[in-house]
Image (cartoon, coloured by chain):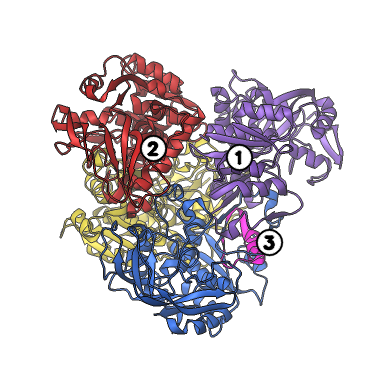
Chain colours: A yellow, B red, C blue, D purple
């Protein structure tokens, strides 16, 4: 096969465009020509060397593209169709997948996350999608690439924060951090029937976007203590569900502190360093608390549902795409995104 | 009314028998003459001053007794009936109770735990039961006091460890510590359909009892590393549900280490000091883990169900009563229980 | 005590205003002075003699009022507060309530429904609320009587249709009949994250209101076959959840026919006559279908949540109040409501 | 390839041994040499022409066998391994499978049931297993063919009756009919923590086996009315879960009649003719009832769990194998099984 451009991990602090062969495909794979992709916060961890991947690996796990080849065992799809695949590509056929834990595919922690982690990813001209039968989701003509660009990862992850929290109609929900995933968690909480949504953020553009996504109150944590403020707003009752969308001790702990007895902490963050459970907030283990972590759900049924949400107009995530770069200039995009300059939320990358 | 004997908290390291007035009752209360009660691990924390209660408070939260008086608003019960009440006595009518979180009655952490904590308890000749309509459960004549003595607390708590873990048929379950609550968790796991139960303990009498309650394998943590051994026994897969029944960093952390991706840590222990989440075991937050804490469920429906379990013969908890003392000699019982001498598991106390 | 006006069931086809003594209250009761109430479809069944109640009973189960007296065992409320109580008034303390089935209070089918069924109801100047601790819910000053008038019954019932259906984000939902309860089911489905809501109705005012409540498509069953149309709209897939909001064989059966394999029929209707399960639609019992019926959830926590929904502005049910009558003229209101004349949805009745 | 013997459907009332080519396999298939299989009640429906299948189809959906060939896309298995596959063989990769409804694979009612229904089945010398990655489950050497012979269908189905019923510790459960599936439902109910199990049957051998599987009381429906007797045994309360394991109006209706308000009817039967819901038993739709149907869960994770149950010794289903025939004599086996002569429960068939 021919050659293509791809953004590869060279070494810590170096992700660069390189020439790589267009991937071969096996009987259960599909090959996509990428039309739009994006950069995720996790990619920044990879860039900085905080999350280890093999040198030479193509980065990226948020593909929108056109099918250009299909393995011999694939049915029901054809070349030329525009599709997405989730950041997580479960096989659907291992013990974990069949048990409803497809993000932990193969029984490995985060085993379903393969693109840009254990196999070549989406920041490239072409992408091999493994277990394509389980992972390709058609995009209707009425939706643009950018409209579905959030489905593979941040929308799936953010919504899952609300879903794993088991938010019910009439719940009060707090969401810590309003980056792209936190904003999607806010949208997901609203879609789930939360009637009071309190978010915590300090960047002005994100505060404004948080309101647009459904926040009733946004607390600027630089201006006031969010735990105190939330307890005040809830008359000392606490919230039913607290969603952690950053990955720090401070936000995790704040979640526990504002969750009412019997309440839930739904954690989306990727933590590093140490994480501790303050026993006062944890009621020494007697508070009937639930702490649940959720990795981005994948698979084509999940993608189909998220595309439905977009298509229904219930949620409009297009404003999250704040910048656009070509694949060749992805280096500049990484710089912008890593520095969180210029009100950046998500960057559309087009090969 | 007359006077009665009661075991009261005098000051740290002093629980003594004293004379107190027999309690008055209000319209929604019942008065029991205690026929059998027992001492709980939590009472030892109170004795040592590690869990603060008011001086003069009557201790104990595991009552079996005879109704001797009923408030004016109570219907459906009559004097002379033998009953139990749970350690947790929910009102059934507050926001938390009506929302299914009755152990957090009133919206306070552990708010449903009143006996021997916020009101006078069961280690006495008489006991006032608040919200009696919600809390009195009849004992059938066919069952002895000792047969139902575990229902109010350890059976309810231990079983809840299995229930909150959402154990399914065919699950592998690990249970850390086989004291009275851990043993009940083992029995509860077996009743819930776990087909492989691995427990961790070192006291020989408890190891034997663990097998009797349903453990397939008991690991002596002084002889081998339980985490390593469990991973070996499960061929590296880990367990579906890990139950913590002690309340230490070590056992909590071990639970996280053996829980498979997508698995559950069901925590029953009362923790003190600090509690940390090792990020490797926690998969940095990406493992779809669930950590759930459960306070002993109470209320008469819970008690009715547990009495059914006892009556059905599915589980025989009588062997857990290893010693018997009169209320007057409760001091000696506290000594024995605090020291875990003589293979003690539970001590029946009779006024 | 003095006398009051009340709408009583005299005999089939006669509900009339009569003079009755203002109710006495016991230690666990409250007495409300009704400020606004309404008529329910069930009241029409009572009027027509289709649902039997005792002669002389005061009808009505949707109270908004002011506390004028409190039983001796009631705490936390005071006279003069404006409150609502649910149509269903669970005790919170029986086996059923403590087991999470409070609408089936006392273990009797629909046992929690007492107002205007087994005790005097709300279409009167005064109302005795039993188990007041479990049932009084404060109304914030910012909300009018009419804004919370739907909470006691139709909003609670309609939302429960969505909740029992376990609607998830991205679901397609069909709702049969858009009377007051069906309209609330539509609002509840939208609040629960359904992204495609298809309703079935023929009355023009109700079709318009259905769109306002969240329907994406309204099928006029007089113009086209709703089952065929729904299968067409879903490309043969069927819906995830079908909600029955009328209580007829035809709508029940249609629900089964449009529910996909693995889907749910959430039934709200009160059926009379016979009900049959067409085996083709039921896949001969092999389709992993779930049929679930739900009686209006009550209790003060439920009311609190619904009041939160109203207060949040997420749903505006005020337009459902299409007419207003004084209690004295309730006869005319019954006529209008029974005939479904004049675009009537709900009628506010003020003593 | 060579030829093999297979039991094929010739026409109504004729299933005969015929010569057929050994199946070819594609990249995602496996080929098994059958070592043991059995006949299911459904096969009798096929035999009688009550359930239509294509003429010439090989019947049977309960395979134990040895892998003799593997498709090119299969990894992790090798020739010579002894395995089972479920009666239901989900693909794991369609929208239904990825949504947790794998028995409804492909979105078709009962779409996951392929063996002996839409593709050639297991009553043959060789069997092609589609989607082998998702469906082959290794049998440990310590277990015999007959010990795991119930896993593919009746154990999976019967247990699912208990699981879908969401039986909790302390539940009272009634199970109507104690044929092979009903007996497995009884075993499953016991494993799930039901403490009072009441079964209904009249065949003496099945009554005896019912007790062995966990029934506390067996009602002979020819000697007394089971509904009356169950209401008596439960003091008018009814049961928490009623399991239908026959597929008739009478048993379905009886289930509804004995289910308490708030209770569940878990239906396993395959119905023919008409099915009606008696409205008194159904509380006119106001009883918070749940009716749930469940098709046999399949897939290798399900099989793995059931093999674990067998291996753990928690349940011993070997006594259900009452007769043994060679494949050549399967005609006689069908006769015996169809007539329910001679205490027959399940018949092991060996090619």
Residue A177 vs residue D159: left or right?
left
| Label 2: chain letter | B
Position of the N terminus of chain C, as image quadrant, is bottom left
Estimate how packed mark 2 is, as few (under 14), some (14 to 19) or many (20 or more) residues with alpha carbons within 10 Å: few
Residue D313 appears in the rendering: yes
| Label 1: chain letter | D
Is C207 drawn above or below residue A289 in the view shown? below
Residue A347 appears in the rendering: no
Q: Which residue is mark 1?
A: D174
Q: CA distance from mark 3 to mark 1?
A: 25 Å
Would you say residue C53 sits in the magenta stretch? no
Outermost residue toward the front?
A: B2
Number of residue marks: 3
Is B217 drawn above or below residue B92 in the view shown? above
Marker disc for residue C274: 3
**SS at badge 3:** loop
| Label 3: chain letter | C
Q: Depth check: give the residue in front, C258 or D261.
A: D261
Q: Depth check: give the residue in front, C301 or D306.
A: C301
Region in magenta: C238-264
Estimate how packed mark 3 is, as few (under 14), some (14 to 19) or many (20 or more) residues with alpha carbons within 10 Å: few
Marker disc for residue B80: 2
Q: Where residue D248 sits: x, y (%)?
A: 72, 46
Do tags 2 and 1 sit on the same chain?
A: no
Q: Depth check: give the residue in front, D206 or B70.
A: B70
Residue shown at the point (33%, 21%) measured from the top left: B345
Q: Depth check: give the residue in front, A251 or B154.
A: B154
Q: Where residue A80 sits: x, y (%)?
A: 57, 58
Estimate how packed mark 1 is, as few (under 14), some (14 to 19) or many (20 or more) residues with alpha carbons within 10 Å: many
Residue C261 vs residue D55: left or right?
left
């Amino acid at each position: 096969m021919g050659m293509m451009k791809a953004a590869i991990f060279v070494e810590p602090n170096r992700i660069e465009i390189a020439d790589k062969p267009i991937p071969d495909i096996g009987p259960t794979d599909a090959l996509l020509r990428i039309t739009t992709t994006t950069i995720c916060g996790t990619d920044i961890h990879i860039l900085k060397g905080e999350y280890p991947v093999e040198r030479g690996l193509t980065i990226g796990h948020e593909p929108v593209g056109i099918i250009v080849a299909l393995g011999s065992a694939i049915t029901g799809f054809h070349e030329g169709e525009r599709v997405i695949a989730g950041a997580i590509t479960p096989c659907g056929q291992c013990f974990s997948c069949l048990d409803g834990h497809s993000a932990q595919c193969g029984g490995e922690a985060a085993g379903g996350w393969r693109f840009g982690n254990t196999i070549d990813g989406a920041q490239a001209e072409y992408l091999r999608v493994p277990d394509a039968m389980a992972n390709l989701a058609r995009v209707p003509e009425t939706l643009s690439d950018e409209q579905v660009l959030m489905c593979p990862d941040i929308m799936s992850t953010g919504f899952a924060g609300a879903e794993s929290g088991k938010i019910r109609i009439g719940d009060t929900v707090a969401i810590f951090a309003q980056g792209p995933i936190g904003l999607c968690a806010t949208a997901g909480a609203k879609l789930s029937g939360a009637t009071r949504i309190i978010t915590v953020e300090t960047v002005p553009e994100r505060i404004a976007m948080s309101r647009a996504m459904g926040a009733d109150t946004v607390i600027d944590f630089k201006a006031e203590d969010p735990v105190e403020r939330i307890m005040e707003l809830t008359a000392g009752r606490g919230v039913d569900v607290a969603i952690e969308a950053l990955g720090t001790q401070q936000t995790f702990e704040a979640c526990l502190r504002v969750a009412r007895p019997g309440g839930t902490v739904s954690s989306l963050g990727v933590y590093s360093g140490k994480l501790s459970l303050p026993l006062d907030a944890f009621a020494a283990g007697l508070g009937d608390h639930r702490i649940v972590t959720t990795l981005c759900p994948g698979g084509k049924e999940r993608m189909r549902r998220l595309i439905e949400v977009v298509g229904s107009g219930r949620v409009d995530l297009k404003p999250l795409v704040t910048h656009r770069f070509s694949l060749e200039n992805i280096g500049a995009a990484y710089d912008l995104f890593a520095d969180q300059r210029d009100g950046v939320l998500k960057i559309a990358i087009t090969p």
